[in-house]
Amino acid sequence: MADLKDDLAALRIEREPIRTRRRNGPLWITIVILVLGGGAAWAWFARERPLEVQTAAVEARAAGAQTGVLNATGYVTARRRATVSSKITGKVIEVNIEEGMVVHQGQVLARLDDSTPRATLALARAQAQATRQGVHENEVRREQASITLARMQRLRKDGHVSEAEVDLARTELDSTDARILALREQVNVADRQVELEETNLDNTVIRAPFNGVAISKDAQPGEMVSPVSAGGGFTRTGIGTIVDMKSLEIEVDVNEAYINRVTPGQPVTAVLDAYPEWQIPAHVITTIPAADRQKATVLVRIAFEKLDPRLLPDMGVKVTFLRDAPEASTAALQPATLAPKAAIRTTDTGAFAYVTRGDTVERRAVQVAGSDGDRVEIRAGLKPGEQVVLSPPAELQDGMRVRIKP
């Protein structure tokens, strides 16, 4: 029996190990594939990606060109600019200007209702005429009083009248003279009143104070206008605004730390925001001798060398103060290297820029001199033709791979 059991045991099929071996094989293969795929994905996402940057070329300035010592921004302003209003309060009945219209000094811009001033003037003239008639009447009476006094004096010599009667006649003459003088003064007062009413009537006509161009029309017929604000905002304080285009200049605020670089008569290059390619020659008129304590700036007035119809009041402008003539003539003898101002970064250790080398960048120390608009003069560190990174990102490092934006 023992041998039979051993034989039967030898014929038994062990299925569990075979099933386990078949299932564990594909599981390990799957784990290996997942590990390899995860590693590949990690390598893909962890790879170094090139940083997108914009570049510009370093330029060479030819000998003879001037460079700037200071940049500032400001606005085109008109030295002569006036909001024309009336001297009296009244209703507008006529407006003769439109925006952009050229006006001349003394030209009628608007008219106010003059019915009341005209009637008041007529009354003043009538009163003056009545006063003159009173003077004429008293002059006739004086002539009569003078004749009477002479007659009384003759009769007194003959003893026909008393001395009191003579004194009475003399008093009447003196009284008439005094009345005439008073009436003549009243005539003068009446004439002054007439002149005042004529002025009030003339004030209903609003004229241009100087030659210029109307840049705004602020009132319409039917509205009330007054030299002072009244009526809760429903009363206009001006008819329109006139600008003398021949008085255009530039006003810029210069940081007080750099005001020592500005001198009267100093050459300036101005660039309007509206025409960035147009460089306008100008010069410094004066520096206003007062600083703004809030902004720590000093106001500088700049005159255009030649006016142009494209210049308009309140236009934004960027100016570059150039070197004075002796310094500029010496500096202009040598060529210079100019780099975009946006490519230069300054730290405590000095200035530097990133120069592209194929698909990588190189951090290079530079020595900066003056400025020329949106460019700076490079004394050392860069060469004309090299490409520098504009506005380098904070994460940009030396040797990092970059991709240049088109």
Image (tube, rainbow, N blue to C red):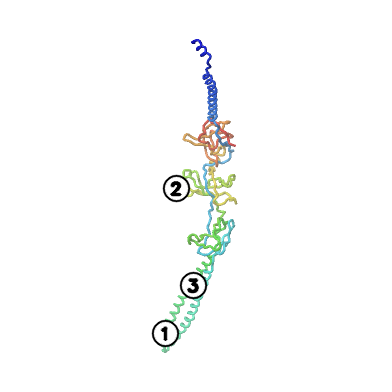
Label 3 neighbour load within 10 Å: few <14, some 14-19, many 20+: many
Residue ID at (53%, 62%) = 223
* Number of numbered labels in the structure image: 3
Which comes sooner in the sequence, label 2 or label 1?
A: 1
**Residue type at the position of mark 3:** Ala
Label 3, on which residue? 190
Label 2, on which residue? 294
In x, y percent, where is residue 232?
48, 60
- Mark 1 near mark 3, Cβ–Cβ under 8 Å? no
- How far apart are the two marked residues, 3 and 2, measured between alpha carbons? 56 Å
- Mark 3 near mark 2, Cβ–Cβ under 8 Å? no
In x, y percent, where is residue 245?
57, 54
In x, y percent, where is residue 6?
50, 12
Q: Is residue 5 above or below residue 227?
A: above
Name the one closer to the observer, 88 or 259.
88
**Residue type at the position of mark 1:** Val
Left or right of 55: which side holds 131? left
Query: Of discs 2 and 1, which sits in the foreground?
Result: 2
User: Outermost residue toward the front?
Assistant: 1
Question: Which quarter of the picture shows residue 242?
Answer: bottom right
Image quarter where the C terminus lies is top right
For label 3, the SS is helix
Label 1, on which residue? 166
Label 1 neighbour load within 10 Å: few <14, some 14-19, many 20+: many
For label 2, the SS is loop
- Mark 2 near mark 1, Cβ–Cβ under 8 Å? no
